Image (cartoon, rainbow, N blue to C red):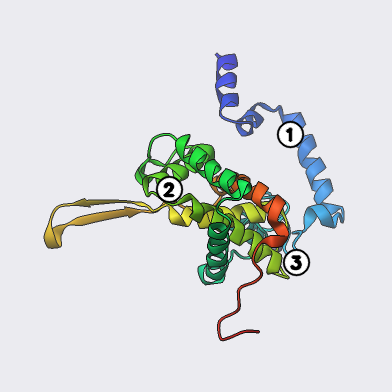
Amino acid sequence: MLVRMKTLLRMRGGYIEGTFMNITMRMRRKAEVKGRVSTPNYDAAYCRVVGCQNPARAATGEGLDSRFCRPHAEHYARHGSPYRKSYTAPEVRPYRKAATDWIKANASDPWVVNALQRVHGLYATAGGHVEAFRLRGLSPEERAKAAWARLRKARVDPVKVLADVLAVEMIIRDDPQADHKREFKEVQAAKLVHRMASGSHKRWGEGASATELHVFPRSRGRVLRHLGKEALEVGELVVDHHRDALPKAPVAKGGPR
Ligand SMILES: [Zn+2]
């Protein structure tokens, strides 16, 4: 009976197995951890964000990271960087416009053709459409697939997906404070792509007594890493072959610089 229970618990992930750890082992570990924390090992004990005085916290939530304090870990989960915020829609807009124009001017380029085919491929293998109401309980991989299926259903032009990916490449190139880790780029691309996939809407009844429900899939955590990885793969050959040809920074509002 115990063996059977143990197996079941193990299937649900490693954490619950700790319950079966014997007391001596647990006490020894506790002493070990205590020792580690009281040793002035700044790497382990403090948040790794430069200038942050908070202690690092071992968090357990989705996407949180024990290298950072709780606010920085949450920032990391949300934006793909512990310190750099996501680019806003107005910041990205001119880049997306420049990228769209560039894609259209290079529509016969083999790498551009290939990238657009990849988007069609993602649409084709995304499976059936899942209402936003039904996303609860799905794995991050399944949610990422559902996002591609929503884009397909909304007939989002693959040019727009590629434009998002190139816009992220360009804005990070031009940002002196950018986080250059791939994860930040993934999350930024995912957020833009995710934004184009609309939510699900339901309406019951008529007139003033009508009830409406609007559900927009949440845009954070591990689903963004999956979606972003797939989005970056769409554009990676275009970026590899045309990095220097990608349009320069669009002229800022209020005239030329
Ligand atoms: Zn911190």
Residue at point 37%, 39% (across, down): 129
**How many C-alpha atoms fall within 10 Å of the one at disc 2: few (<14), some, or many (≥20)?**
many
Q: Is mark 3 on a helix, strand or loop?
A: loop
Amino acid type for the residue under numbered disc 2: Leu
Amino acid type for the residue under numbered disc 1: Arg
Q: Viewer-proximal residue, 236 or 185? A: 236
| Residue 219 visible to the viewer | no
| Residue 48 visible to the viewer | yes
Q: Viewer-proximal residue, 84 or 167? A: 167
Whole-percent x, y for residue 205 in the image: 14, 52
Whole-percent x, y for residue 37 in the image: 80, 51
Query: Are the two marked residues, 3 and 1, in contact with CB atoms closer than 8 angstroms?
Result: no
* Mark before the other along the chain sequence, 3 or 2: 3
Task: Please give left or right for residue 257 compared with residue 32 in the image.
Answer: left
Residue at point 59%, 79% (across, down): 252
Q: Residue 151 carries which label?
A: 2
Spatial CA span between label 3 and label 1: 30 Å
